[in-house]
Image (cartoon, rainbow, N blue to C red):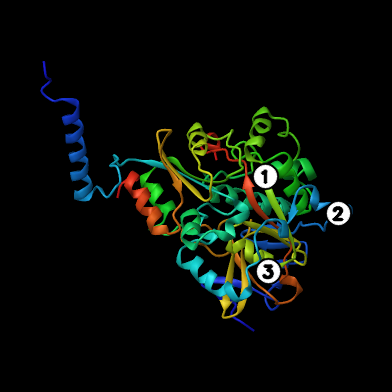
Amino acid sequence: MTPAFPAKQTINLALIALLVWLHFGGGGVLPVAAGPISVLVVEETADRDKLTAGQLDIIGSNAPDGARAYLKTHGEPDPLRVVDKDDSLSQDDPKWQAAFAAKGATVPWLVIGRGGKVMLSEAMPADAAETMQTLKRFGGQ
Amino acid sequence: MGSQIYRGETVYDHTNFGSLIGDGRTVHAGGEDRLLSRLPEPPGHDRREYSRPFSESGIKIIPRSEWSDRIKDQEKQKRRISDIQFWPALDQNGTPQCWSNGVAGAAATCRVIMGLPYVQLSPASVACPISNGTSGGFEGDAVRYGKDHGWAPSSIFPQHATGRSLLNDPKVVDSRPKFMLLEVFDLGDDYDALGTALLENLPCLAAFPDWSHVTEICDLLEIEAGSYGCRGKNSWGNDWGGKNDAHSGGFYTFREKSGPHCRPDGIFALRQITPHPGTEYLKAA
């Protein structure tokens, strides 16, 4: 007996749905439910002078539109770490250990997590606005 | 002579420095008689045992030609170290522990720059094992103790404590590894290195030999075009000095090149402290 929806048709429908979603605002970014986030920035502290102004802002700015202020309202409890790539986080909360384990090979690196699970791990954008956009994608507007 | 006030904060130079030093050993400030208790570096003291020269930090000295623009950018983006200090200034409260307060203040700031929650680190937890907390000291000894043994939070080791009774308290012993200094640089009396460290958001501390005092140093400032100074955070209580937007007090400014009184020495920059949340010590703080 032939199934009502053969496997090939199901795959085609899924592909069409994906294309439609990408066309209407998906922008190539998978949707995520917004909620409180934790943010880990991994840097090479000896190379801090190589960070862009935008990266320094993410790390250190207390401006109302900066990451630290954003995380006060959209972050999990204890929502930020800025650590060296060679640090040991063995004494820190397990969520930070998990985030640190997900770091990439380059610095500075950005890891976003929620509930101890890593949601995004990528090279940190040079531009602060781009990083804030990424944080808001996971943490909400 | 330049301005004596910068954005509401007193700028100290050779003309008004006398108000800070009293009789040379004690000055009445912030409602208390403040003991000026910094001692010179002891003979044989080796800073290399616990710190590295700033030249080994990997950070290039920022040319003075860039200072003005960078300072303006830091101010605009609220990226100065003082911009994130939302906690009240330490208060020595009559103890001769400035040399330990300046270090503990900078270490607590270092934690917050790393994203860790603010925990007040007890200056006395380092001063007591070194000097019983009842006599003056050298800031390098406090830096070394923080690196070798760590601090206890003020919630379990009161910041004004003296004596040795708390040193073997199991809670105190258990807490120290959670608050250890991991990386510290010795800047000597190099003002260009100090400016660079502050522009790169490394909290510093400095001694002022003619003041016999040590404080945390937060920001590099341009008081007038081409004239610089450093903003410190004193440990004479929150009502002394200027306040930031979060009503955190203790801020003052020393103008550069305004005589030997205002020349910082014994400058250290802190870069890493144990990544431990320390939230179990917040409730009682």
Res. B250 image quadrant: bottom right
Give coordinates of residue A126: x percent, y percent: 45, 58
User: Label 1 to label 3, Cα distance in Å?
Assistant: 23 Å
Provide the secondary structure element on which disc 3 rests: helix
Say which amino acid is labelled 2. Pro
Q: In the picture provided, is A130 more to the left or to the right than A87?
A: left
The quarter of the picture where residue A63 lies is bottom left
- Does residue B163 appear anywhere in the picture? yes
Q: Chain of mark 1?
A: B
- Quadrant showing the C terminus of chain B: top right
Q: Which mark is residue B192?
A: 3
Q: CA distance from mark 2 to mark 1?
A: 23 Å
B166 to B95, vertically: above or below: above
For the N terminus of chain B, which image quadrant?
A: bottom right
Nearer to the camera, B150 or B167: B150
Considering every residue shown, the one lying at the far right of the view is: B43
Mark 1 — residue?
A: B182
Q: Which amino acid lies under the numbered mark 1 shown in the image of this protein?
A: Leu
Q: Say what secondary structure mark 1 lies in.
A: strand
Q: Is residue B249 left or right of residue A111?
A: right
